[in-house]
Image (cartoon, rainbow, N blue to C red):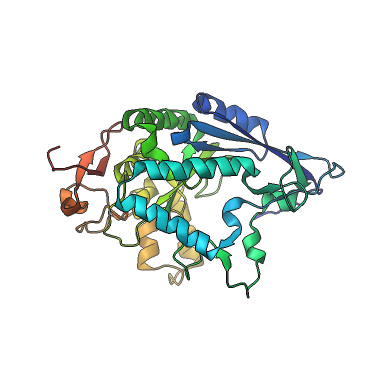
Amino acid sequence: VTFQLEPAFKRSITYNFTNDSDIEDEFMEHARKNEFGDIQWYPSRRTAVYRYDNRVPLNTSGDGVNDFLGFQSNLILLSKSVRATEKGFENTRNVGGKCTMASSFVSYKRLIANGLKNNKLIFTGYPVVGPHGKMQTSGSCLYSSPIDITNTCAWDPRINGLFFYESTAKFPASKFGDFIRDVKKLRDLVKPENMCGVDIYNGFLFRFIKASEAYLGQSEDSVVLDFNYFRANDALTPRLNQDIWEEVEQMAFVKYGAKPHWAKNRNVAFLDVQKKYLKFNKFIAAKNQLDPKNMLSSEWSDEILFGKQTAKGDGCALEGMCICSEDRHCSPSKGYFCKPGLVYQQARVCRFSSSSSS
């Protein structure tokens, strides 16, 4: 591994909240024009947020920081209330309630520039210019007081705060536009409000990476897609609009052959993963040479690395341990049955219906 030092510089960031009508045709041009750019897409809001983010000279005026909203400390009561509210909407199948949450969160992110601060204290306007290190890293929760008993990070396991799935897929850039078009077709078919669940978090985040010669790297320029969505506390509890996110997940990893992030996905994302890497055997050879006694391996890591399908049990699809092929892999007692996808019809998803024949 080679590290290269370069002269210090600052970055200038502007977020552009706009309509998502051309996002499938514009994402690559945005990547080419913005060295550190990304895009957040809120499908239920029909909103795309283009991040214009480029280096500027070190003597450029500005001492901004990127204090990303999701990584700030929060009142414990607030974190618990947000989680309880979403659980309540899930339990009552209240799509409108989840959309109110999504609309409020997106509006607030726009108001505060998603955590950018011009002077380390507040956001006063674009562009926000600051040292590269303070714009690349983010999250003031890391520096919060350990003796503060009223605030904590939202994901702190000691409180009943955030609890969600994170799916991360790496697409060849040449295929990503078609994936977006499929998601838009699905949105229009099921109605946008049924996609509000993902917009309560960060919508779809698009990031861009260059081709790599690494054994488990991307063989061509690629787009990394991240999206978060509600996870029940009980593994056997189905979720509102579960079928939509299972279809998106299978579109990504099966139809378009996206590669999974090794630390961020449900088990189904890793099925047959070794077939997606041309140099997978070289990686295994290097692994065996460096760790001949498998000290760094386990039954779990081997299951992920080799993409093995485990035995399918009742409810296995609810936590992403399997792709359903029978109703029992979902939750028929709670009205969830194994059905084909709506746009990607080869997908098999757990969909809520009043009977198995509906």
Task: Count the marks.
Answer: 0
Q: Quadrant of residue 138?
A: bottom right
- Residue 343 image position (x, y, % from top left): 30, 31
Q: Is residue 189 above or below residue 133?
A: above
Quadrant including the N terminus: bottom right
Q: Is residue 302 above or below residue 266?
A: below
Q: Residue at x 47, y 32 (%)?
A: 176
Q: Residue at x 33, y 45 (%)?
A: 94
Q: Is residue 64 visible?
A: yes
Residue placed farthest to the right in the image? 59
Work out whether residue 107 or residue 68 is closer to the camera in this orientation and state it: 107
Quadrant including the C terminus: top left
Residue placed farthest to the bottom in the image? 147
Q: Is residue 147 above or below residue 18?
A: below
Q: Is residue 169 visible?
A: no
Left/right placement of residue 266 relative to residue 174 reads left
Q: Quadrant of residue 349?
A: top left
- Residue 340 image position (x, y, % from top left): 23, 37
Work out whether residue 312 or residue 135 is closer to the camera in this orientation and state it: 135
- Residue 57 image position (x, y, % from top left): 83, 41
- Residue 131 image position (x, y, % from top left): 77, 49
Q: Residue at x 54, y 33 (%)?
A: 48
Left/right placement of residue 257 relative to residue 66 reads left
Work out whether residue 4 or residue 228 is closer to the camera in this orientation and state it: 228
Q: Residue at x 68, y 54 (%)?
A: 2
